Amino acid sequence: MTPPVLEVENMTVWYPLRGGLFSRVERYVKAVRSLSFSLSRGEVLGIVGESGCGKSTAAGALVGLSPWRSGSYRIIGNPVHTDNASDWKKVCDKVQMVFQDPFSSLNPRQTVLEILTYPLKSRGISAREASQKAEAMLSRVGLAPELLSRFPHAFSGGQRQRIAIARALITNPEVLVCDEVTSALDVSIQAQVLNLLDELRRDMGISIIFISHDMQVVKAFADRVLVMYLGEMMEYGAAEQVFSNPQHPYTQALLKSIPTLDKTHPPKILAGISEMPADDFCGCSFAPRCSQREARCTEAPVSIRGASVQVRCVKALL
Ligand SMILES: Nc1ncnc2c1ncn2[C@@H]1O[C@H](COP(=O)(O)OP(=O)(O)OP(=O)(O)O)[C@@H](O)[C@H]1O
Ligand SMILES: [Mg+2]
């Protein structure tokens, strides 16, 4: 059996907060807590959750941008030693990231040709071959090859995001980590970029981690979905099942808060703010905001229930 393209077990990322005269670590932001997920070839995994729940941190950890505290990471069955710099160089060949803001993620002083050929030349590919690949990749993402000599400022947001996707794909990775890649774009351009990602997945077999605040887009695009709250998995499974029959009260609340033009069913905004519980708190971290809370939710650790859909809730009927 072929292993998943990417497997993460108990990913934990803490950011140290320093202070005082000697800049000592005073405490940690526990941004991602024991997160486990996997990704098969050609699959799209959507990651959703409120602002600050750790989506970008988890995405960054997949490419070595966030500091792993513990956990295991495998790419096509091969372990990545997250404290080993040379392992991260190998990860770059397999996993590439595209960021939210196409205006700041491209170097304004480089032409598109330079942007696209740099990753190839740094891998020892000749200038001639690199230019040919850049030209082919630019047309693959729907831009004319004659645009190679232009600088990023001469492109619209949607075009820049295509260039960022082309740069990520130029080294032929297995996985594209897309962190809110459509949020800075207007609705019609969003659809174009999503169509492009869908084509890439179908034609090239690319697997995609797709982070978004837009639940409708995740519902339409993702095969599986991971719902995060305060750095933890709350619900994880087939997107169809999670969206049609959400088990966790947090997923239910997120779905009820989707903006709609239907005045008869106005969105229900989830009350309260997400606040990290005290270190000695062992219950469900969503319990303080949960309308279905029971005494047992805050008295003992909440285990994960279910197999095809996993839910961290004592009430989940799985
Ligand atoms: N470099 C950092 N140093 C300290 N804390 C950080 C750092 N980066 C992120 N955090 C904190 O980690 C937590 C998770 O942040 P992260 O950016 O991953 O959230 P997010 O889900 O991507 O949010 P958003 O939807 O707003 O992009 C937040 O509490 C954030 O303040
Ligand atoms: Mg983010």
Image (cartoon, rainbow, N blue to C red):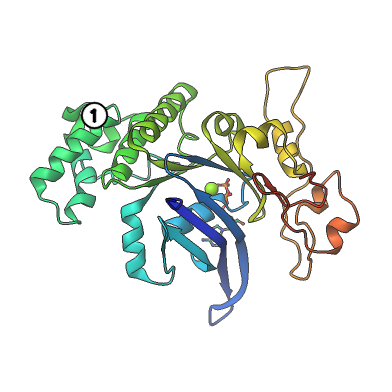
Q: Is residue 204 left or right of residue 7?
A: left
Compared to residue 124, the image places residue 100 above or below, namely: above
Q: Which residue is the site of mark 1?
A: 139
- Camera-side residue: 285 or 75? 75
- Camera-side residue: 78 or 34? 78
The residue under the point 67% across, 27% down is 259
Q: Position of residue 77 (x, y in %)?
A: 42, 59
* Rendered-image quadrant of the C terminus: top right
The residue under the point 24% across, 45% down is 115
Q: Is residue 12 left or right of residue 288?
A: left
Say if residue 98 shows up in the picture.
no
In terms of secondary structure, where does tag 1 sit? helix
Q: Which residue is the extreme one toward the right?
A: 295
Q: Amino acid at mark 1?
A: Ser
The residue under the point 47% across, 34% down is 182
Q: Which residue is the extreme one toward the front?
A: 1
Q: Position of residue 28 (x, y in %)?
A: 61, 69
Q: Position of residue 99 (x, y in %)?
A: 42, 44
Q: Would you call the spot at circle 1 few (<14 residues within 10 Å), some (14-19), or many (20 or more)?
A: some
Q: Position of residue 20 (x, y in %)?
A: 59, 78
Q: Is residue 232 left or right of residue 187?
A: right
Compared to residue 37, the image places residue 156 above or below, namely: above
